[in-house]
């Protein structure tokens, strides 16, 4: 049985209005000890902002945080998954979008946030594999024989015998199916 996003997500979501400033966002993050906020406009998710956004865009550039509106700083559109999606789908979406957190929707409404850490807590032994897969920009590291370990691109099962077939890392079972 697959683990669903709703089983691991953080809820309720910490939100902040789109008209607020970077300073307001920083204060809210500090108060609640969170590194991520969903920016809302008229009650609907409009974007997201992280503590690293504040550091790289405000602190490092010596900009006054009370002068920058979140509308000018947030990342949009939001990248979201449905609460009924499985965590593997969420992990893939994180990798595709080069992010570590996704907003979670239920019937189109904000329901939570799921992070790599939330997913890793469900299966600690997979933490290294998840981080490795998300950090990959191109293709996995390969051995001389062009064999690697990881998740099969076809069936998503873990294998210690993945081989590159038509630019996909395929396990032995899936390779046999392709040959038929």
Image (cartoon, rainbow, N blue to C red):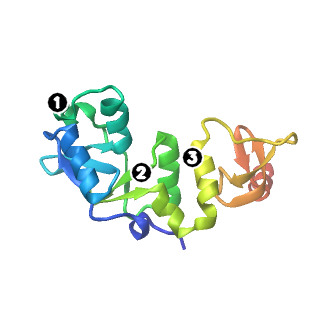
Q: Mark 2 against mark 1, which lies toward the viewer?
A: 1
Mark 1 vs mark 3, CA separation in Å: 34 Å
Find residue 21 and report its horizontal and vertical position in percent: 17, 38
What label sits on residue 67 in the rendered view?
Answer: 1
Kind of element beneath mark 3:
helix
Q: How crowded is mark 2: few (under 14 residues within 10 Å), some or many (20 or more)?
A: many
Residue at 52% across, 45% down: 95
Earlier sequence position, callout 1 versus callout 3? 1
Q: Residues within 10 Å of mark 3 (few under 14, many from 20)?
A: some
Pick whichever, 5 or 153, lies toward us: 5
What label sits on residue 141 in the rendered view?
Answer: none
**Residue identifier under label 3:** 134
Residue 110 in sight here: no
**Residue identifier under label 2:** 101
Position of 165 with respect to 25 (left or right) is: right
Earlier sequence position, callout 3 versus callout 2? 2
């Amino acid at each position: 049985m697959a683990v669903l996003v709703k089983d691991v997500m953080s809820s309720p979501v910490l939100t902040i209005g789109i008209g607020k400033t970077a300073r307001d966002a920083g204060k809210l993050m500090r108060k609640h000890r969170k590194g991520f906020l969903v920016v809302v406009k008229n009650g609907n998710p409009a974007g997201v902002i992280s503590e690293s956004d504040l550091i790289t865009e405000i602190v490092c550039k010596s900009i006054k945080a009370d002068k920058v509106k979140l509308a000018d700083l947030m990342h949009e559109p939001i990248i979201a998954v449905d609460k009924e999606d499985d965590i593997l789908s969420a992990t893939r979406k994180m990798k595709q979008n080069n992010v570590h957190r996704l907003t979670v929707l239920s019937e189109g409404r904000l329901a939570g946030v799921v992070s790599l850490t939330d997913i890793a807590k469900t299966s600690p032994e997979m933490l290294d594999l998840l981080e490795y897969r998300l950090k990959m920009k191109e293709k996995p590291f390969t051995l001389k024989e062009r064999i690697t370990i990881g998740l099969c691109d076809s069936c998503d099962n873990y294998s210690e015998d993945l081989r590159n077939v038509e630019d996909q890392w395929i396990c032995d079972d899936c390779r046999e199916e392709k040959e038929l």
